[in-house]
């Protein structure tokens, strides 16, 4: 390849992570190209769903707490910049048996990182939040500072601000492959070619079909999100009255509810979905899936089970250990893979964009990214 790189960096995929990366990179003064096969924000991948939870008491692993605290700072900065709410404070309750992974992990993170929280038994939970009906042997960890982010709004803002900062954004163009050369990387799309000195791949569920060697590593999982009208028309289901809830059942499955923000209560399973292909996923929600969620509401929040208002399919891209990937590709250090958030990544979009900009410009980050390196999978297999 002899043509000089036209851009300093190309960002492939402009969902939550990619649009944030494009914004941070453009604000560092780099010549940025952002490419998305669709027109973000859209509802075909992972960066949608009307409401996403952000919390500090991170049951998945305490290592995420420093990252999420920086994410909060950057979301507040975005609020100040656009003079509009980005964080909608609701509080969140993790509910399950005292020895469940959800409860033990949440308490470990909260205690280790001094996150304000309360431990409530089932009776106290119902007294505090009367719409919740936990089983007698369940406990709850309440984090009052947890909040909701609206993904469509945030992706739209990041795309708009990246463009204002000078990024060139191309929609409706699909990246097919890339090839490294002496002066950068050539991106081949269904419309032509682009050149960049570095590439940041944020392709989400389309990563296995784009990045060689990841199809056997990453698993795309179909998830269903549903919205229900409360059975009673009252304010106790809205923000400020009903918290976000995550429930771990006796069989280990986890489901969530989110308060009514004007479009109904959001309810869904967290994981346990079918493995799928993003280009062939079944986007029609079945009667059995509707009935399953109705049963959860009937058992644990019966006052919330009115009429079903809407359903939508969402995609998780999972790694074997459910941790992120933020790493250079083996054999092509000019390509940075930022993907596979395993169903818990949206809240980190603000800080991951900053991390990407640091890595592209200096090769370093203020955070320990060792847990997110690709080499960990080789070590696990050894």
Image (spheres, helix red, strand yellow):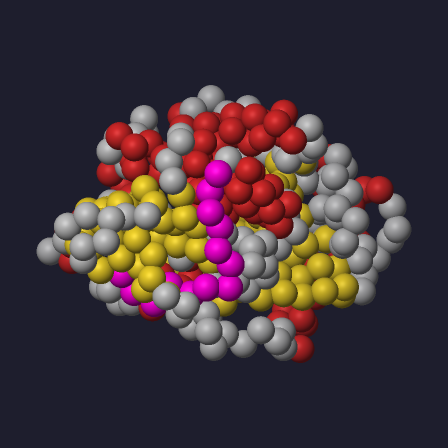
Farthest residue in the right direction? Answer: 233
> Where, by quadrant of the figure, is residue 293 drawn?
bottom right
Pick the front one: 58 or 364: 364
Looking at the image, residue 380 lies above or below residue 112: below
Magenta-span inclusion, residue 167: yes
Looking at the image, residue 107 lies above or below residue 296: above
Looking at the image, residue 227 lies above or below residue 6: below
Relative horizontal placement of residue 260, taking residue 376 as reference (left or right): right
Pick the front one: 23 or 165: 165
The residue at 32%/26% (across/down) is: 366
Magenta-span inclusion, residue 158: no
Pick the front one: 336 or 166: 166
> Magenta segment range?
166-178
Mostly what secondary structure, the magenta segment? Answer: strand
The residue at 22%/60% (across/down) is: 179
Image quadrant occupied by the C terminus: bottom left
């Amino acid at each position: 390849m002899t043509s000089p790189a036209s851009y300093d960096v190309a960002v492939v995929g402009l969902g939550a992570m990619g649009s944030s990366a494009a914004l941070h990179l453009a604000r560092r003064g780099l010549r940025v190209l952002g490419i998305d096969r669709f027109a973000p924000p859209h509802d075909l991948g992972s960066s949608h769903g009307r409401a996403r939870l952000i919390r500090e008491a991170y049951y998945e692993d305490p290592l995420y707490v420093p990252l999420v605290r920086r994410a909060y700072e950057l979301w507040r900065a975005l609020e100040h910049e656009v003079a509009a709410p980005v964080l909608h404070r609701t509080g969140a309750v993790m509910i399950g048996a005292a020895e469940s992974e959800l409860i033990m992990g949440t308490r470990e993170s909260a205690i280790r990182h001094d996150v304000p929280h309360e431990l409530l038994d089932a009776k106290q939970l119902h007294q505090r939040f009367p719409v919740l009906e936990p089983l007698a042997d369940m406990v709850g960890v309440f984090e009052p500072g947890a909040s909701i982010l609206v993904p469509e709004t945030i992706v739209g803002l990041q795309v708009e601000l990246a463009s204002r900062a000078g990024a060139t954004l191309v929609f409706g163009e699909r990246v097919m492959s890339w090839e490294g050369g002496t002066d950068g990387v050539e991106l081949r799309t269904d419309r032509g070619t682009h050149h960049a000195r570095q590439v940041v791949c944020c392709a989400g569920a389309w990563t296995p079909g784009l990045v060689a060697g990841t199809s056997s590593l990453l698993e795309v999982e179909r998830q269903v999100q549903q919205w229900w009208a409360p059975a009673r028309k009252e304010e106790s289901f809205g923000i400020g009255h009903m918290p976000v809830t995550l429930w771990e059942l006796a069989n280990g499955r986890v489901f969530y509810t989110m308060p009514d923000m004007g479009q109904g209560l959001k309810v869904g399973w967290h994981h346990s979905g079918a493995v799928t292909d993003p280009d062939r996923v079944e986007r029609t929600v079945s009667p059995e899936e509707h009935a399953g969620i109705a049963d959860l509401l009937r058992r644990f929040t019966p006052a919330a089970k009115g009429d079903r208002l809407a359903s939508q399919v969402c995609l998780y891209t999972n790694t074997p250990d459910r941790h992120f990937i933020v790493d250079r590709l083996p054999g092509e250090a000019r390509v940075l893979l930022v993907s596979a958030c395993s169903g818990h990544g949206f809240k980190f979009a603000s800080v991951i964009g900053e991390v990407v900009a640091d890595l592209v410009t200096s090769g370093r980050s203020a955070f320990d990214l060792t847990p997110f390196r690709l080499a960990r999978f080789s070590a696990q297999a050894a």
